[in-house]
Every structure is written in C-alpha cells, then in structure tokens.
Image (spheres, grey):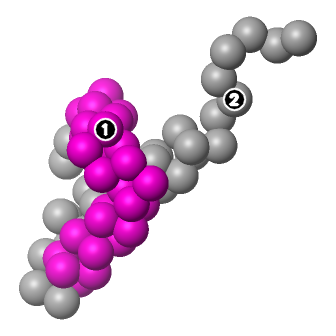
Amino acid sequence: MPSDVDIYRAAHLMMHSHGGDAELEAAINADRMLRRGNRDELLTWLRIWRTIAVMRQAPSGLPN
C-alpha cells in the first residue's frame, strides 16, 4: 500500500499531466482496477481520486 506522500505525489502528477481531467482519469483507472478484480490497486486509485478532489478545493495564496 503506497504511503500518503506517494498518493499526494501521484495526485499532483495526475493534475499536472491531465489538468481538469485528472479526477476523471483517476476514476477511469479505479474502474479499470475494479473490473480486473484488483482490490489493492482499486483502493490506491480511489485514494488518488479523493486526493485530487481535496487538492482542487484547497484555497491557494494568502488570505486577505
């Protein structure tokens, strides 16, 4: 099972390479693992997907 840091890095790379479609790509990969019956990889992709969603909601910059 990848560490939290690994998940964060993967989410960051997905956002960098796929931009606005990063969540969709993570969901597609999670679905692929579900269909293959690969539970460990499914859980990893679900964590990446959730991390991307949280990172998108996080405020950036300094508060006013």
Count of residue discs:
2
Q: Is residue 5 visible?
A: yes
Q: Residues within 10 Å of mark 1 (few under 14, many from 20)?
A: few
Give the residue drawn at x 38%, y 68%: 24
Give percent across and percent down for residue 28: 28, 75
Q: Amino acid at mark 1?
A: His
Q: How far separated are the C-alphas under marks 1 and 2? A: 17 Å
Give percent across and percent down for residue 30: 28, 72
Q: Is residue 5 above or below residue 31?
A: above
Question: Which of 37 and 49 lies nearest the eye of the viewer?
Answer: 49
Q: Is residue 12 above or below residue 46?
A: above
Position of 34 with respect to 59 (left or right) is left
Earlier in the chain: of badge 1 and badge 2, it is 1
Numbered disc 2: secondary structure: loop
Give percent across and percent down for residue 44: 26, 57
Residue 40: which numbered mark, if any?
A: none
Give the residue drawn at x 44%, y 54%: 20
Q: Residues within 10 Å of mark 2 (few under 14, many from 20)?
A: few
Residues in magenta? 5-34
Foreground mark, 1 or 2, reads 1
Place residue 2 in its image quadrant. top left
Place residue 5 in its image quadrant. top left
What is the residue that sits farthest to the bottom in this orientation?
Answer: 35
Residue 59: which numbered mark, if any?
A: 2
- Kindly report the secondary structure that dominates the magenta region of the rendered protein: helix
Instruction: Say which quadrant the C terminus sits in.
Output: top right
The residue singled out by tag 1 in the image is 16
Question: Which of 31 and 12 lies nearest the eye of the viewer?
Answer: 12
Question: Which of 5 and 17 lies nearest the eye of the viewer?
Answer: 17
Place residue 10 in its image quadrant. top left
Q: Is residue 3 visible?
A: no
Give the residue drawn at x 19%, y 64%: 40
